[in-house]
Amino acid sequence: MSETFAPSPTQQAEILMQALPHMLHYDDAIVVVKYGGHAMGDEAVARSFANDMVLLEQSGVNPVVVHGGGPQIGAMLTKLGIKSQFSNGLRITDKATVEIVEMVLAGSINKQIVGFINAAGGRAIGLCGKDGNMVTATKLSRANHVTDSRIEEQVDLGFVGEPARVDTTVLDQVLGRELIPVLAPVAQGADGETYNVNADTFAGAIAGALAAKRLLFLTDVPGVLDASGNLLKELTIADVRRLIADGTISGGMIPKVETCIYALEQGVEGVVILDGKQAHAVLVELLTDHGSGTLIRK
């Protein structure tokens, strides 16, 4: 049986001395954390994440958790015999599918995260974009290029939306009261319909509306990598656009960094892309000199 490392009192004091300036830097600041579907798959990782959110709140930070759930939605649709269709990475969501999306996101996943945070000693409250008209969505339409031509065709994604307006009234009442809001990216449109919103986009809109000090994207990669596969610690918006143009940033990382740019332009101070599978990645990023992942500033 391996022995658990226990730091000496002196080592504990040194750790606190290193963390204290960072704790003061983020005192009473809002930090939005986008918690991805793949990072939620392991219960031990999920419980560790919950512990980190509680420690942040107890340290004077105001964490806001926005979660995804793509793998879990896919599993439930398969279980119910509903075939998933995608267009450019977005799930085509018909009436039957959006009901399952809402059930999984705003129901089982949301309450599981709330339960883990509460079990870790925190006080979490589960919400979605519908609550208090927090997020009003508009139907998202996308154009696809027809094969071997420059002609574009409009793809009907069904009940897939994007944030049109964010009302922070409910969050303003929750934050600063020892409560940790956990948000599911489901929103209502002005037409009264329910829309499935991409969790990254949802998190960017929330962080922008709250003028968050940090928006953290927990992913399954260390951050933005250079052409040789090395982690890029810090980038500006201009750097990001240059790396997209020369092909260094490609594939699924493009929409993620575009959301980072959107959040920065909305007033977020800094956005970090980091590996959600790394132990205590959020604490390493916020409360140590070392940092974790790629920080993007305006």
Image (cartoon, helix red, strand yellow):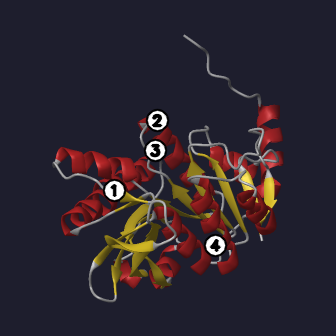
For marks 1 and 4, give the CA distance.
27 Å
Q: Nearer the viewer, residue 222 or 15?
A: 222
The numbered mark, 3 or 2, whose residue comes first in the sequence reads 3
Q: Position of residue 112 (x, y in %)?
A: 35, 51
Q: Amino acid at mark 2?
A: Ala
Where, by quadrant of the figure, is residue 2 drawn? top right
Farthest-out residue, top: 1
Callout 2: helix, strand or loop?
Answer: helix
Residue under label 3, please give it: 38
Which quadrant is home to the C terminus?
bottom right
Q: Residue furthest left?
A: 81
Q: What residue sits 47% from the left and 47% below the top?
A: 120
Residue that numbered label 4 is attached to: 263
The quarter of the picture where the N terminus appears is: top right
Give whichever of discs 3 and 1 has the lower sequence position.
3
For label 3, count other residues whose C-alpha is less than 10 Å away and answer few (under 14), some (14-19) or many (20+): some
